[in-house]
Amino acid sequence: MLDIKQKLIFKAFGLTISSDMDLPELIKMNDQLEVTDIEILIDPELTSLFFELSDNPQKFLIKENLIMFHLPEIATFSIKEGRRITVSPMIGAEAGEIRLLVLGTCMGAILMQRGIFPMHGSAVAINGKAYAIVGDSGAGKSTLASAFLNQGYELLSDDVIAVSLQEGNSPYVIPSYPQQKLWQDSLSNFGMECSNYQSLYGRVNKYYVPVAARYHQEPLPLTGVIELVKSEADTIEIRRIEKLSRFSPLFYHTYRNFLIQGMGLTEWHFKTSVCILQHIKMFQLSRPVSGFTAPQLVSTILETLNLGE
């Protein structure tokens, strides 16, 4: 269960966060700020309110400035006005599972409410620029990002990539927090011992991996997006996605894109997509289903983008 203690202050996605719950994944701030960008509150009454407002408790309640959802045996969640995340934990719920949802679905929704474009993937810093690796769950996004880190590059974000328009509508990736989530097979292939890391709640073969030494803390211009897909072929292939064909993968890999229409953000998403696509190159990278190819994928990307040292 989550216990309410003294307010804790964190930083993530360029935002300051005051929280009733500990969020060990995030960067903790020593200063007690009077005003923060986001509040995370624990409210036992939230579940009752959700059932009063919702016509279908099994679905998300989506309005312009309010999103609510309920997961049995875990918690009820509310994301409001780009400023407040409220949680009502169920009896016996694990704090780790609640944190996964707060830092995932809830944070993705609050970024959209604040006009920040969330993508589903990992972002790495290469030669002063940001490159996003997107793909379906299990495609190997975090593993590929980790392979970049092993070659001396830095991580900007894992899972949720926050893209903000700055300096003449140019897209910039805002760093999230210094941690990855990697499967046991990936750890083994990188020569890392699972016993050195904490297991991700509910996924006994996936682990939290701190990357403070390889974390880039300043925003960088988004220059490229690589869509990673699995293929039955035995070889690695990369192709450039051109012109209007880029809109579909950008929408598809928007984090929690099913929220966009109900939030009244369809026009915002399209206009932001146009700005992003004006400044980036997009590629689809196919990797074999079997075998560990992450180092070769790094080489393929660097060669294609002419980014080798």
Image (spheres, rainbow, N blue to C red):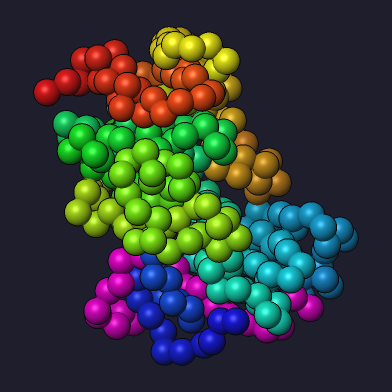
Q: Is residue 171 visible?
A: no
Quadrant that contains the C terminus: top left
Rendered location of residue 247, percent (x, y)? 54, 21
Rendered location of residue 179, percent (x, y)? 35, 55
Residue 17 lies in what quarter of the image? bottom left
Q: Is residue 52 magenta?
A: no
Q: Is residue 256 visible?
A: yes
Count of numbered badges drawn on the protein: 0
Q: Is residue 27 magenta?
A: yes
Query: Outermost residue toward the bottom?
Result: 5
What span is colored magenta in the figure? 26-48
Query: Outermost residue toward the left?
Result: 309
Residue 97, compared with residue 205, is above or below; it is below
Q: Who's the residue at 35% across and 54% down the image?
A: 193
Q: Who's the residue at 45% across and 42% down the image?
A: 185
Q: Who's the residue at 44% across and 51% down the image?
A: 181
- Depth check: give the residue in front, 95 or 266: 95
In the rendered structure, the answer to whether residue 126 lies left or right of residue 226 reads left
Query: Outermost residue toward the right?
Result: 55
Rendered location of residue 52, percent (x, y)? 84, 72
In the rendered structure, the answer to whether residue 125 lies left or right of residue 146 reads left
Q: Who's the residue at 25% across and 14% down the image?
A: 303
Residue 213 lies in what quarter of the image? bottom left
Residue 268, compared with residue 183, is above or below; it is above
Quadrant that contains the N terminus: bottom right
Rendered location of residue 121, percent (x, y)? 46, 39
